[in-house]
Image (cartoon, coloured by chain):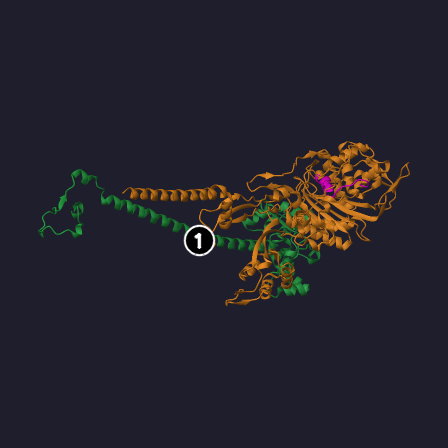
Chain colours: A orange, B green
Amino acid sequence: MTKTIRNRRLRYSVVMIAVIALVAVFVVRLVDLQVVQAAELTKAAEQKRSIPVTLYGARGSIVDRNGVALADSVTRYNIVTDPRLVAGYTGTLGGTRLKKISVDQALAAVAAASGGDAAAMRKTIDDDPESNYAYMVKGLDVEHYEAVLALKVPWLYPERQAARTYPTAAATGNLTGFMGTDGAQAGLELAYDKCLAGKNGSETYERGEDGVQLPGSTVTKTRAKDGGTLKTTIDSDLQYMALQDIASAAQEIGAVSATATVTRAKTGEVLAVADYPTVDPNDVDATTDKGAYGSRALTDTYEPGSTIKAAIAAALIDQGKASPTTQATVPYSRSFPWGGRISDAEYHPTENLTLTGILRDSSNVGITELGEALTAQQRYDYMRKFGLFEPQSAITYGGQPGMDYPASPQWDSQTNINSMFGQGISTTALQVASIYQTLANDGVRIPLHFVEGCELPDGKTIDAPEVAGQRVVSSAAATDVVKMLQSVVKGGTLVGMKPISGYNVAAKTGTAEVADGAKGYGADRIISVAGMAPAEDPQYVVTVTFTKPGPGHKFSSSAAPAFRTLMSQVLEKYRVAPSTSEAQLYPSTW
Amino acid sequence: MSTNLALVDPVVAPSRAPRPDRARPDSDRPELVEVAPTRAQRRARPRIAYAVVAVAALGLLLLAQLGISMVLSQGAYTLSSLDGQQTQLARTQQSLSEQLRVLDSPQNLARNAQSLGMIANSTPVYLDPKSGVVYGTPKPADPAEATGNTADQVPNSLLGGVPLAATKGDTAASKENGATADTATTGAAKTPAAGSGAAAPAAPAADAGNTGGASASTGASAKSSVESDANQLQAPTTR
């Protein structure tokens, strides 16, 4: 009897020990899995089940004043492969019947569908068969991409790529700039990159064996952020017309380059900045001249020549040193005690001209005679207030000249004289436009700008330029100068220009000599016309500039037809009410 | 009732128990005893209904759970297919709006207009709807005096494969021999000019008549245009 009891106890103990040992093993394993290896295992599990997804933040577009896209983001697709997996397979290759398909057959079909090169693809694969990533074709648009996808080649994978398109192409390429493989390369794309750039986000989801997303498994890690929309004041249609005008004129007169600007007088909004030659941002490589990648109107400085005389005249009247009828006796040339000598563009006997007459005939001698009534410092200050010698404060655009000038002029005696007819000082084409905007706007300069601001997706606008107006000369002085400039069109240096039917136009020509870099001036010229219309109440300011025109076109009159065409287009496009009365001119002679 | 009773045979299994009515000779075996539970015992015993309800509820819950997850996963499939559709449609939308923007570009519009024989009129005429004043004198557009040139100077590589949208046969004609196209367009331009000229010539006519200008017009509506003659005349004559 006791033996049975002992046996039973033994049996109990053995079982208990076995159970405890088993539990201990389980516990150890449990701790190992749940605590020790937990992190790694969870990660591994997630990697096995969860699919990471990139959420694309689109780069913002650049739009013109009417909302027309100048630059826009589009999606392109790259086709990539894993060369280690490339092999023949059995499939349909877009057809209906299953068949054996060789690598070359597949590549040929892909090439046909994508417009790529099968031989190049084959070479890429053969070059490095051990790699696990190789591009087959890049930058496919939707149609081609879907055609490739329809082939269902098992070892080809699509890859999304954000790309940029410029619908207005070369018409606005000088301003928009363009994107390269390393991001923004030039123009507004570069200047406002921070606001335009979107930020990609990421999320993960888990999916079942058949690839369907498991409900409720989406985890957004970072939200995608779209870039802002850069709003410009440019009118893309007008800019197209401006470029058409100067491009054909430049070719006709053999100019190396040309610029044109159109500005709204009352607001300082630039409606068009055209540059010839320019770049088509959709096909940057087609433009070999790297100098044409940007906007010469904004970045290139030149000696403006006689267009500056309008500013000198305004300063004289503003200071009470002259009036439109101030009389001067103007010989053909003038010599100075330091041995310098200046002369007018064309020979003429000594004339009795008023200030109006001096502007009309663009007399260098005349303007220096009257201009000397102001000190160099005064003239320098006026020019500065007109926007010269300073960076364009309301324009953010890479490559603009530094314009780091001292507070007082560093002119020698000759430059002091020359500066009055625009030699020895340098400006950009837009700065000249700024002078004429000031005159057209009753003497108040509004910093010229072509960017309104960058509108973020949440509706907030950032990067809006500071465009507060600043009085430069009195309203009377500005009005007087505009009135005098009508004489230029009616009987002066622009007399050859066909009148714009219905409108009184005030304009000034400039024929500047180009420094040849060796402390002197060569035969090259920069010819320009800057003007406004209608003269009674100027609405629009137009400037055109041609650099180094060919033989026979060295005078500003060669720039006149382009100015006229562009001005007519502006007046017609914006439905400007025609002038209602004949221009009232000041007497030019006495 | 039988389930509520327990039949107890202390020694032998009940199945093997001899039936009570079949009297057995060996009387040392005890009689089968019927044990009747007390009321309290009966009451305390679990009722079958509760079990049924509990099990049924559990079953329902499981079924509901199953149903919900079926619906959910069905939803996942729908979602995934709709997602695919959305991607597809977004792609189509993108490619179409891209095409539209290309067609919308000034380069494309200009070259199409030119291929149709259109030119930029150098003498625009305006009508001020507020005052009824007409500015300028209407004239047929003259190709020799067109504003702006016609040769395309502004490259747009996006237009590479975009054909000109012109009426049949017209494109070739206007491209190949501009002369015929030109005469065609000036001819066409003349008709509306003559038609709309009906209003404008009234002005010069009135101008010539000066004193009796109003007599030329009869209707009341025409009268208002006569009233604005003063301005109307001024514009074409002085400008």
Q: Is residue A424 magenta?
A: yes
Give how far across and how far down residue B59 sits, in percent.
Answer: 31, 48
Q: Nearer the viewer, residue B138 or A304?
A: A304
Res A138 visible: no
Q: Nearer the viewer, residue A485 or B46?
A: B46
Give the residue at x 80% y 53%: A550
Q: Is residue A97 magenta?
A: no
Residue A439 found in image quarter: top right
Quarter that holds the N terminus of chain A: top left
Give how far across and how far down residue A583 sits, in percent.
Answer: 72, 43
Q: Nearer the viewer, residue B197 or A10?
A: A10
Give how far across and how far down residue A292 sits, in percent.
Answer: 72, 50
Res A305 visible: yes
Q: Residues within 10 Å of mark 1 (few under 14, many from 20)?
A: some
Q: Nearer the viewer, residue A568 or A78?
A: A78
The residues colored magenta run: A422-437
| Secondary structure under the numbered disc 1 in the rendered image | helix
Residue carrying label 1: B77
Give the residue at x 23% y 42%: B46
Quarter that holds the C terminus of chain A: top right
Which amino acid does the dot numbered 1 rest on?
Tyr
Vertical arrangement, residue B22 with respect to residue A433, above or below = below
Using the image, name the chain to which the residue with label 1 belongs.
Answer: B
Give how far across and how far down residue A558 sits, in percent.
Answer: 78, 51
